[in-house]
Image (spheres, rainbow, N blue to C red):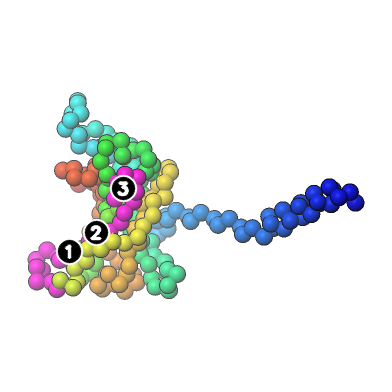
Amino acid sequence: MDTKLARRAGALSLLTLGLAAAPPAQAAEAMPTACTGAAVTDPVGDADVFTPDKAPGFFVPVEGSLDVREIFFTKETGADGKPRLRANVGVASLDSKGNPTAYGKSSVWDVRFTTADGWTYIATATLKDGAWSFSLDHPAPIGRPDAPLAQRIDTTITGKAYEGRQGVISMDIPTEHILDWSGGGAFTDVSGGSSVENSLYYSDQAPDD
């Protein structure tokens, strides 16, 4: 065989082996869905932003990321074998680089729910300067100011934003932070909403007042 042809064949064989040895690409994580029905639904097209510096009017209609369409929970087992609860906010269309950052402020989405023992939990997602952060707040119940400080929570959690049409903002809630967690996740007074940070008003609430 010609020396040049032999070298080319050898290089092609190495390239072929390299391609064969490459690991398969990982599939994108599926967007959470309300398999058993949403805890709260909200009509699309009713979101606005309070902007006193813009005319005419103080409330400017907005679409997309701030337009909440549903609040729902999902449950699964994490890699550590522990149960994982997710609080999810479904929006009309999620785009972290466009709306709602066009208003020059960070934006916030939250999910509120109450457990059988009367404790309220607030999972919050914040988008600021293109970066996401997530937190869980567990204040003392109304009428129970003597609740032990050890039972109050204000901590950072993990989460993920699934962008695109009918996008979802998902917040991971460690079940060890839920005092009477039994795995059922039967919550009352479930609500949620979106807002521009430091605004006096929600941009959208689910359910509507």
Does 36 appear above or below 128?
A: below
For the residue marked with disc 3, what is the amino acid?
Leu
Disc with the residue nearer the chain's start (3 vs 1): 3
Q: Which mark is residue 139?
A: 1
Question: Which one is nearer the viewer's eye here, 161 or 89?
Answer: 161
* Magenta region, residue range: 126-148
Q: Is residue 170 left or right of residue 58?
A: right
Residue 42 at least partly seen: no
Does 161 appear above or below 54?
A: below
Crowdedness of circle 3 by 10 Å Cα count: few (<14), some, many (20+)? many
Q: Which residue is mark 3?
A: 127
Q: Is residue 120 left or right of residue 24?
A: left
Residue 150 magenta-highlighted: no
Residue 136 magenta-highlighted: yes
Question: Which one is nearer the viewer's eye here, 18 or 78?
Answer: 18
Q: How far from the left and from the top, in percent, is residue 16?
A: 73, 54
Residue projecting furthest to the top = 56
Report the mark closest to the observer, 3 or 2. 3
Q: How far from the left and from the top, in percent, is residue 148?
A: 14, 73
Give the residue drawn at x 39%, y 73%. Answer: 82
For the residue marked with disc 2, what is the amino acid?
Ile
Q: Total of numbered circles in the picture?
A: 3
Query: What secondary structure is marked by label 3?
Result: strand
Disc with the residue nearer the chain's start (3 vs 2): 2
Give the residue drawn at x 25%, y 72%. Answer: 179
Q: How far from the left and from the top, in percent, is residue 188?
A: 24, 62
Q: Which mark is residue 122?
A: 2
Give the residue drawn at x 22%, y 45%. Answer: 197
